[in-house]
Amino acid sequence: MSVQKTVVVTGASQGIGAGIVKTFLDKGYNVVGTSRRISETALFERAERLELVNGDVSDPDTAERVAQRAVERFGSIDALVNNAGIFFTKPFLEYTVDDFRQLSATNVEGFILFTNHAIRQMLRQKSGGSIVTITSSLTDHPIAGVNASLPMITKGGLNAITKSLALEFAGDNIRVNAVSPGVVDTPLHASNPKDLLKSLSPMGTITAVQEIVNGVVYLTESANITGEVLHVDNGAHLGKW
């Protein structure tokens, strides 16, 4: 890259987020990673091009501090990856309004806060930019027995706003896309039986973290793709199998 670009990554301390940080560093980007206690992680070698910021994504102060730190240290925000998210399953009748507020605070409010700061900075820079959000294959194709109705309100909303923002900021060359995973081999599924997880897609496989990361990098660097929801889910969005 002729000019070093800066990417902000939320939920960056483990799983998909940590993989995203490592890959962007390997590709020569400056990276600002955030999560509640990311400064305690031993996953990353401390590098000149890496800045770690502690904070809860649903707290407006966190997004402001992260954006400020990115610009102060590296001079720009060229890409944002909205990876932070929470997910838990229950029968619909057992979910509470408090459950929804918790899901919405991280998954939706966090998205709004970070995307707002990133787009404002990208508009100031007048050089375009990329926003990629991690959503879920279950928004398109619910699976019997995986009762995730309330999380999917939030993830489905992210798919919808991805398309709206893509159109709203197309003229500014700010591209807005999403990656929609199925079952990924992350700490979230550490205690789940592998055979059960494999049954949740027609290809019968569990997605490696790096496959999701590759999708994020592809959308971040693809100058002509915007408003896209890229399914990396072993075909789970296709229907019954």
Image (cartoon, grey):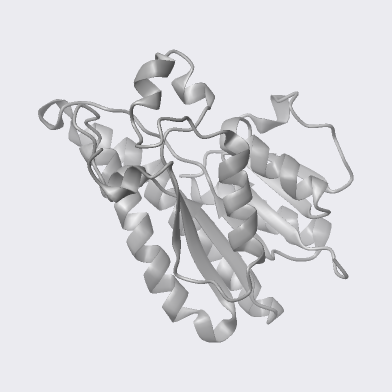
Q: In the shown orientation, is residue 116 left or right of residue 98? A: right
Closest to the observer: 57 or 11?
11
Q: Within the image, what quadrant is residue 117 found in?
A: bottom right
Q: Is 196 located above or below residue 152 in the figure?
A: above
Q: How many marks?
A: 0
Closest to the observer: 36 or 137?
137
Q: Position of residue 112 (x, y in %)?
A: 44, 58
Q: Position of residue 87 (x, y in %)?
A: 37, 33
Q: Within the image, what quadrant is residue 221 found in?
A: bottom right
Task: Name the residue: 58% across, 35% down.
Answer: 209
Q: Within the image, what quadrant is residue 51 found in?
A: top right
Closest to the observer: 235 or 222?
235
Q: Position of residue 58 (x, y in %)?
A: 46, 44
Task: Name the residue: 56% across, 39% down.
Answer: 11
Closest to the observer: 38 or 197?
197
Q: Position of residue 1 (x, y in %)?
A: 85, 66
